[in-house]
């Protein structure tokens, strides 16, 4: 289980005139995500969804609050006051900076992150991209080739193993990114707008591919998306963020059964309901009761 408790993230910004100002990206956000769930984070642009996702991944430390996975803390919050800094130093006074970097300040969980820009190595073929991930996981050399072919087949890229990313469509590159994430055998996959850069038809195909992978593996998946319809089609639960500073405005269960139709009355009703939450948060009014 992923449990985020009262997560806040504050950034200090220096303006061109040399003065500083603060920005609160996320404010006291708490959520629980069960094992094997598919959860989407939605909300207006700039509301802190991606920042929150990176905190779940351990790529950023929260200013306040904690993230635990199966009861184990991912990263400690950064010290925010002089007293907290002194406590931080006392706690780690016998730990070298190198050890801190390797152990204390590194994610302690099997998490894979997939970004919008694919994040695959352009100088490697699809097969070589997977081999590299397996090598980093210290899989024995004799097993890597077979496993690489297995993960490529899992995302429908068996016939493209020898292609370079530049020879692949956007949808194929995103499938490759998913295969590489699966190859490290994570318990949790975090996705930040993974299908934003492709056309509508390709996006819908990738959604179906992702659902198939999720059904077969039952990984925990947390995805940031601006597409409310995508969140409804894919998710068990939708976490709706308010405008900046991002707080968790509502948690909406998607409780109608799969397989779903994107144009079903249930999907349309839920889409309108979430859109009205956006409308109320930005204008203070909504067309009906939310």
Image (cartoon, rainbow, N blue to C red):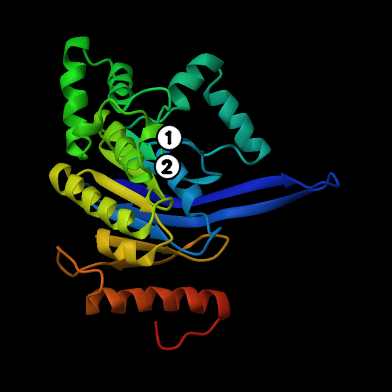
Query: Is residue 70 visible to us here?
Result: no
Q: Who's the residue at 41% across and 27% down the image?
A: 121
Left or right, 8 with respect to 215, comes to right
Most extreme residue toward the bottom is 288
Front one among 205 and 286: 205
- Classify mark 2: helix, strand or loop: loop
Location of residue 139 in the rendering, given as x and y in whole percent from the top left corner: 23, 16
Q: Which residue is labeled 1 in the image?
A: 119
Q: Who's the residue at 30% across and 34% down the image?
A: 181
Separation (CA) of disc 2 from disc 1: 7 Å
Q: Indicate the quadrant where residue 129 lies.
A: top left
Q: Is residue 171 above or below residue 161?
A: below
Left or right, 212 with respect to 177, comes to left
Q: Is residue 220 above or below residue 227?
A: above
Q: Indicate the quadrant where residue 187 lies.
A: top left
Q: Is residue 211 above or below residue 44?
A: above
Q: Is residue 81 above or below residue 269?
A: above
Query: Is residue 85 visible to us here?
Result: yes
Front one among 263 and 275: 263
- Classify mark 1: helix, strand or loop: loop
Front one among 142 and 169: 169
Q: Indicate the quadrant where residue 134 lies.
A: top left
Binning the other alpha carbons within 10 Å of mark 2 as few (below 14), some (14 to 19) or many (20 upward) gives some
Callouts 2 and 1 close, C-beta under 8 Å? yes
The C terminus: image quadrant: bottom left
Any mark on residue 10, and which? Answer: none
Binning the other alpha carbons within 10 Å of mark 1 as few (below 14), some (14 to 19) or many (20 upward) gives some
Front one among 85 and 137: 137
Location of residue 183 in the rendering, given as x and y in whole percent from the top left corner: 25, 29
Most extreme residue toward the right is 17
Location of residue 21 in the rendering, given as x and y in whole percent from the top left corner: 74, 51
Q: Which residue is labeled 2 in the image?
A: 115
């Amino acid at each position: 289980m992923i449990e985020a408790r009262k997560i806040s993230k504050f950034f200090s910004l220096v303006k061109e005139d040399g003065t500083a100002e603060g920005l609160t990206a996320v404010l006291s956000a708490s959520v629980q995500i069960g094992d094997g769930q598919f959860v989407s984070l939605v909300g207006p642009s700039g509301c802190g969804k991606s920042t929150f996702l990176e905190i779940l991944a351990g790529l950023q430390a929260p200013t306040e609050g904690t993230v635990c996975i199966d009861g184990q803390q991912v990263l400690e919050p950064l010290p925010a006051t002089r007293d907290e800094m002194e406590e931080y130093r006392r706690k780690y006074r016998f730990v070298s900076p190198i050890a801190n970097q390797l152990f204390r300040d590194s994610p302690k969980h099997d998490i894979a992150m997939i970004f919008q820009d694919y994040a695959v190595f352009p100088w490697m073929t699809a097969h070589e991209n997977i081999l590299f991930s397996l090598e980093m996981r210290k899989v024995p050399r004799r097993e890597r080739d077979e496993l690489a072919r297995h993960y490529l087949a899992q995302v429908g890229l068996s016939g493209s193993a020898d292609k370079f990313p530049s020879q692949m469509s956007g949808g194929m590159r995103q499938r490759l990114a998913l295969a590489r994430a699966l190859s490290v055998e994570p318990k949790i996959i975090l996705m930040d707008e993974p299908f934003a850069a492709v056309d509508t038809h390709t996006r819908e195909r990738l959604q179906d591919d992702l659902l198939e992978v999720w059904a077969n593996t039952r990984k925990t998946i947390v995805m940031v998306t601006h597409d409310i319809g995508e969140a409804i089609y894919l998710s068990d639960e939708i976490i709706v963020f308010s405008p900046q500073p991002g707080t968790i405005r509502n948690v909406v269960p998607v409780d109608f059964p799969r397989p779903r139709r994107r144009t079903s009355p249930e999907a349309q009703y839920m889409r309108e309901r979430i859109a009205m939450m956006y409308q109320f948060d930005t204008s203070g009014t909504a067309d009906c009761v939310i």
